[in-house]
Structures are given as C-alpha cells and as structure tokens.
Image (spheres, rainbow, N blue to C red):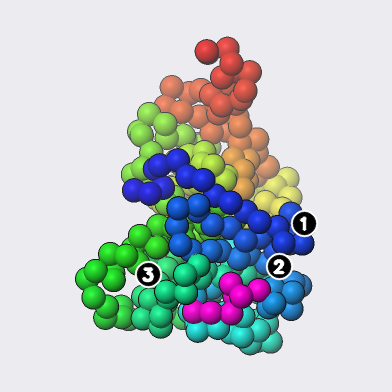
Amino acid sequence: MITQRPQTIQIFLPDGNPISIKIADLTNRMMTAVLFPRNKLIEVGLREEVRKYGIYFLFGYSEEKAKPIAYIGETEDCFERIKSHNKNKDFWNYAIVISSKSNTFTKSHVKFLEYLCIKNANEIGRYDTENLATPAKPYITESMEADLMDNFDTIKILLATLGYPIFEELKKSSVKKKEILYCKGKDAKAEGDMVDDGFVVFKGSIANLDETNTAGSWVTGLRSKLIDSKILVKENQVFVFVEDFLFGSPSAAAAAVLGRRANGWIEWKNKEGKTIDKLLRVDSLISTQ
C-alpha cells in the first residue's frame, strides 16, 4: 500500500500564513490538494486549482454531534459549487479541493472518486457525513478504476497530512492483542488504543450507565453527545459502544467510559496492569532503551 512507504509532500503557503490557504501535493503524483478556511473563499477563487473538475470536502463541527462532520462532492468547477454551499450549508469552516495537475480528470473520474470517498468515509466512521447516501457505483472501465484506486490512495495521504484523516482506519483488528488497553470500573469494561491523533475506544466496550455526582458538566455533556449520536446505546443497565469512537485524549475516553472525571493516563492499562503513563511517557521510554 502507498501509505506504508515513505512519502515526500510539498505544502505551499501562497499568502505566507500557516493557518490560511495551503496547497499540497506528493512530489511524484499528479494531484493537488487545496485547503482553505471559509473566510478565504474569495481569495482561493483566484487560483486555477479550484476552477476545474475535482472532488471537494467540507469539514466542520456541530454542537449536537459527537463526531466532526464532512460533506463530499464532485463537480466540474469546485469553486462555483463551494460558493453555493457557502450560502446553504452552515456547519463547515474548512474546505479541501482535490484536482489534477495535468487537467486529466473528467466527469467520469470525479464521479467515481466521489462514490469511493463517500463509501469509505461511511465505512470507517471517523466523521459523520452530510451526504444523504452513498451514490451508486458509476460504470467505468477496469483500467480506469485501477488508476482511480491509486488516486484514492493519494487523496487519503493528502487529507490526513492536512489534518483531516477521514479515511484512516480505527479498527481493533489492526491492533496487536498485547497492545490493547483496558479501562474498568463498577460495570464498565472497555477496550481501546492510543493512536496518532487521540484515543480510540473499540466497538463493544461497556460504559457505566450513570455519571457520578461530581462528574461535572463537561463529562455529562460529552456523554450526552455520544448518546444523542447513538454511539453509546443503553443495553440492560449499561451503555455499549456500538462503533469505534475516537476521543481527543485518553482522559476523555476514560471519562466517557466511567461516567466521571478521570485521568486516562492512569485508568487505561495493558493486560499486565501497566498504565499508559508507565508505558508511554517519555521518561519511561528512555529508561527502557
């Protein structure tokens, strides 16, 4: 897989601002990604990269939902389509446009990439997609499909590099059994793992039904979002995670599982009972060298 090899990615800042417009590409690939904040929509419209056939992503958050939100689309002029979304979609604050450096994308190319991206985003589940449904798989030739699968691998790398790992797996099956971490307390019994961008609690984990009196509004609010988003579902007298869920930190994950304030660096332990504080803190790592 392309993601398992070292890669060189160039990121150009056209206005010199590292939190503004970014133009990224892999040096050996014929695709470009343009990321821009919503307030730079007019400025980015001057760039030819966003004025051609392409696939685009809108990213944002909702106060009601536990997961970040994404919308995925395709069009012959990405800027004009995103301009229309600027009028009728409120949730997004960043957009990314993917286009071909050599202008080789056609309607067939981008429709297939849209199908592939929506399908994979929904299967992986890191983001809630605003798309109502996965579109039907378009008919293309076998050779074109092989090329576009290669393009999809490039899209995965570019999006993750720009801070939106929408296609990165969170599966328990990818973790060695000895590396799985456990959080237990009262009725709670959860399994998870530290990943590059946070802490994932795996599907099937059990969380306490009730919060403690001292849990605080942050913990109750976090769990309410998970319940409202149907990520935590009540079964008998516990809550069950019905899908893998990525938290921003091990402490947030532990708080959701235990229903109280928690130091995740101490609550999460491996099968030998070692906390992640002992397993992963820098001083511990240095002492084992």
* Residue 147 horizontal side relative to residue 59, left or right: left
Image coords of residue 114 (percent x, y): 42, 74
For the residues labelled 1 and 3, the Cα–Cα distance comes to: 33 Å
Residues drawn in magenta: 47-53
Given the image, on which type of amino acid does mark 3 rest? Answer: Leu
Q: Write down the residue under mark 1.
A: 16
Mark 2 and mark 3 in contact? Answer it, CB < 8 Å: no
Disc nearer the start of the sequence (2/3): 2
Given the image, on which type of amino acid does mark 2 rest? Answer: Pro
The kind of secondary structure element at disc 3 is helix
Image coords of residue 30 (percent x, y): 46, 62
Q: Write down the residue under mark 3.
A: 116
On whether residue 96 falls in the magenta region, the answer is: no
Image coords of residue 46 (percent x, y): 69, 77
Residue positioned most to the left: 142
Frontmost of labels 2 and 1 is 1
The kind of secondary structure element at disc 1 is loop
On whether residue 52 falls in the magenta region, the answer is: yes
Q: Visible in this render: residue 4?
A: yes
Q: Residue visible at 46% across and 28% down? A: 270
Q: How many marks?
A: 3
Instruction: Please give the label number shown on residue 37.
Output: 2
Image coords of residue 57 (percent x, y): 55, 71
